[in-house]
Image (cartoon, grey):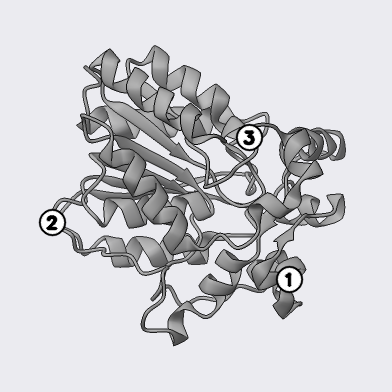
Amino acid sequence: MSAEHDRQQIEQANASGRVPAVFVHGLWLLPSSWDRWAEVFAEAGFAPVLPGWPDDPDTVAEANEHPETFAGKTVGQVADHFAGLIGGLQRRPVVVGHSFGGLLAQILAGRGLACATVAIDPAPFQGVLPLPISSLRSAAPVLTNPANYHRAVPLTFEQFRYSFANAVGEDEAKQLYETFAVPAPGAPLFQAAVANFNPWSETKVDTEHPERGPLLLISGEKDHTVPWALTNAAYKKQAHNAGVTEIVEIPGRGHALTIDSGWREVCDTALTFVRRFVSPE
């Protein structure tokens, strides 16, 4: 995703005078995974901004042709990238993130950069201690080879089916894989895996920042990659913040809950929370 494209979105959001809604994707997806969400938030009066991670290709086809563009991206580098983009906005935005995007959303909120935050099946931050077996299996395509730290790693359909699309039918799983799946940098998964042994981990979140703002954590009941134990552990740490902190579990949903055929339920849950605290105008 080009820097020029990001700049144009920021200019459009500023020109609108509305509260921006910044959507942060996670591993194995692109900003286009938020397109339908952006339409819903725009209809609700927000100014959607869908930035990429640094050097994100524009399309899934391009991403799969050039996986090397993803290699080497770290959590800290991507967090600083998004913080810089938010710094160009004239109004403090709503931030919505999924998976590693949910971790990034919490990092940004912990810097006081968001007026409200929704973290959906968020990757764990430093201090979140559970290690569910299903999470380890989901990360195995990357973590089983230390050389993957510096590489971009694609998922096979079978791996995507387990990690993302376990709660949908086979046909829908294939459609999701073909439509959305791209390679991902290995580094963030290694960073998350050793976060609790590294005092300087880039996955650290300031859960006590006085301007963190309202935060909603959403968990998919059947998520293999970030199951309830991880999201709930994050919630318990975030709940010490003076701001509103809530958690909700979406029944019967897996890690693909932001892109699968039930995406609208999750989107509406996020939007309903945001609108309790933020007027888009």
Please report whichever mark, 2 or 3, sits nearer to the chain's N-terminal start.
2
* Element carrying mark 1: helix
Q: Nearer the viewer, residue 71 or 128?
A: 71
Q: Quadrant of the C terminus?
A: top left
Answer yes or no: is residue 125 visible.
yes
The residue lying at 47 percent from left, 62 percent from top is: 75
Specify few, some or many for label 2: CA neighbours under 10 Å numbering under 14, 14-19, or 20 or more: few
Q: Disc 1 designates what residue?
A: 140
User: Quadrant of residue 135 in the image?
Assistant: bottom right
* Amino acid tagged 2: Pro
Image height of 239 relative to 179, above or below: below
**Left or right of 275: which side holds 267?**
right
**Left or right of 8: which side holds 177?**
right
Q: Position of residue 190 (x, y in %)?
A: 59, 73
* Amino acid tagged 3: Ile
The residue lying at 64 percent from left, 32 percent from top is: 58
Q: Position of residue 205 (x, y in %)?
A: 33, 65
Q: Disc 3 designates what residue?
A: 259
* Element carrying mark 3: loop
Which residue reaches farthest front?
A: 4
Q: CA distance from mark 2 to mark 3?
A: 33 Å
* Amino acid tagged 1: Ala
Decide: marks 3, 1 in contact (CB < 8 A)?
no
Q: Nearer the viewer, residue 248 or 82?
A: 82
Q: CA distance from mark 2 to mark 1?
A: 37 Å
Q: Disc 2 designates what residue?
A: 210
Image height of 92 relative to 158, above or below: above
Q: CA distance from mark 3 to mark 1?
A: 23 Å
Specify few, some or many for label 3: CA neighbours under 10 Å numbering under 14, 14-19, or 20 or more: many
